[in-house]
Image (cartoon, rainbow, N blue to C red):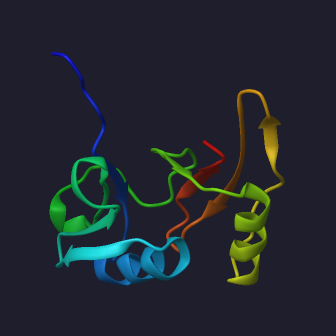
Amino acid sequence: MDSVRITTAFIPVADPATSAHWYSRILGFRIYSEDEWSAVLRSGEGVGSTSLTLLGPASGIQAKPGLGWATCNFAVAGLGQARSDLEGQGCEPSAIEGAPEICCFFTIRDPDGNTLLITDR
């Protein structure tokens, strides 16, 4: 295998459609599909695009919503501004932590209580 890349992250949610609209409004993802089993959201186009799949109970996922750890990270430009923007949208971001030479980050929780890791890279 020459190059392997992660293209999709999965997060358990109670209601895929409701969660999809929250992720779209708060983090800017485009909703690609949604039904009672799952919702697929996208960021970017083509080969460099990534997907986020929100899995509801009907999907058969064994993980329950409310993960205390992040399944992936959401990289943003301007970490401080992103934190302020999310706070302004009703999220309760943690303090920015980390090391500038490695990675800086903060966390928020989605409406299902899943921890989301917001990073500068």
| The N terminus sits in image quarter | top left
- Residues 62 and 4: in front is 4
Q: Position of residue 104 (x, y in %)?
A: 74, 41
- Farthest residue toward the top? 1
The image quarter in which residue 26 lies: bottom right
- Residues 42 and 56: in front is 42
The answer to whether residue 40 is left or right of residue 98 is left
Q: Residue at x 57, y 55 (%)?
A: 115
The image quarter in which residue 80 lies: bottom right
Q: Which residue is drawn at 78% across and 71% down?
A: 84
Q: Where is residue 99 in the image (x, y as percent from the top left)?
A: 80, 31
**Residue 84 drawn above or below residue 77:** below
| The C terminus sits in image quarter | top right
Q: Residue at x 72, y 56 (%)?
A: 79
**Residue 99 drawn above or below residue 79:** above
Q: Position of residue 41 (x, y in %)?
A: 30, 68
**Residue 17 drawn above or below residue 67:** below
The answer to whether residue 20 is left or right of residue 75 is left
The number of numbered badges drawn on the structure is 0
The answer to whether residue 4 is left or right of residue 65 is left
- Residues 66 and 7: in front is 7
Q: Which residue is drawn at 70% across and 66% down?
A: 82
Q: Where is residue 18 in the image (x, y as percent from the top left)?
A: 37, 84
